[in-house]
């Protein structure tokens, strides 16, 4: 009697389930094991990358960069006696403070809003800061 040996599967070439099913299962299990914060950070990184922005963690001081992410907080803080609107932008890799000097309010600059900003990055008290950046509002809040 002839023995039939199980050979490689035509879909994968290695005798296991198709590659798409393995990748989908792996992705599902990773998402199930991740915390909400990790999933949000991953989504932010993906969205920022699609916008052609530099990851905030890679931004060097005293260089111009374009960053994109979601505004976490927006506060009014006086600087040197003048009003200054400060917003904390997160892209999942790091956080940068955006500061508009002389402004009390800017329409559309609200927590949860997606934003793309461009300007000179500086570091103050160990935090990355961009003063009076050019910005584009993205998607709804």
Image: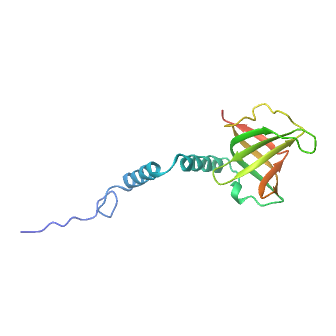
Q: Nearer the viewer, residue 121 or 53?
A: 121
Q: Nearer the viewer, residue 43 or 85?
A: 85
The furthest residue to the bottom? 2
The location of residue 36, given as percent across then percent down, is 53, 46
Q: How is the image coloured?
A: rainbow
Q: Name the residue rendered at 84%, 59% in the picture.
A: 62
Q: Nearer the viewer, residue 17 or 88?
A: 88
The location of residue 80, given as percent across then percent down, is 93, 45
Say which quarter of the image contains residue 83. Answer: top right
Say which quarter of the image contains residue 121. Answer: bottom right
Q: Name the residue rendered at 38%, 55% in the picture.
A: 22
**Position of residue 84 in the picture relative to residue 97 (left or right):** right
**Position of residue 119 in the picture relative to residue 9 (left or right):** right
Quarter of the picture holding the C terminus: top right
Q: Is residue 16 above or below residue 96?
A: below
**Position of residue 26 in the picture relative to residue 58 (left or right):** left
Q: How many marks?
A: 0
Q: Is residue 84 above or below residue 49?
A: above
The location of residue 73, given as percent across then percent down, is 72, 40
Q: Is residue 37 above or below residue 110?
A: below
The location of residue 63, given as percent across then percent down, is 82, 58
The furthest residue to the left? 1
Quarter of the picture holding the N terminus: bottom left
Q: Name the residue rendered at 77%, 54% in the picture.
A: 128
The furthest residue to the right? 81
């Amino acid at each position: 009697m002839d023995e039939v040996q199980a050979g490689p599967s035509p879909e994968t070439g290695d005798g296991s389930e198709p590659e798409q099913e393995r990748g989908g299962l792996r992705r599902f299990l990773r998402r199930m094991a991740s915390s909400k914060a990790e999933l949000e950070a991953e989504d932010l990184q993906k969205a920022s990358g699609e916008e052609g922005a530099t990851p905030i963690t890679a931004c060097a001081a005293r260089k111009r960069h374009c960053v994109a992410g979601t505004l976490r907080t927006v506060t009014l803080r006086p600087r040197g006696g003048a009003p200054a609107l400060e917003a904390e932008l997160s892209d999942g890799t790091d956080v940068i403070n955006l500061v508009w000097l002389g402004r009390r309010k800017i329409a559309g600059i609200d927590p949860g809003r997606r934003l793309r900003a461009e300007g000179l990055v500086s570091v103050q008290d160990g935090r990355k800061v961009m003063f009076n950046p050019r910005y584009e509002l993205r998607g709804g809040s």
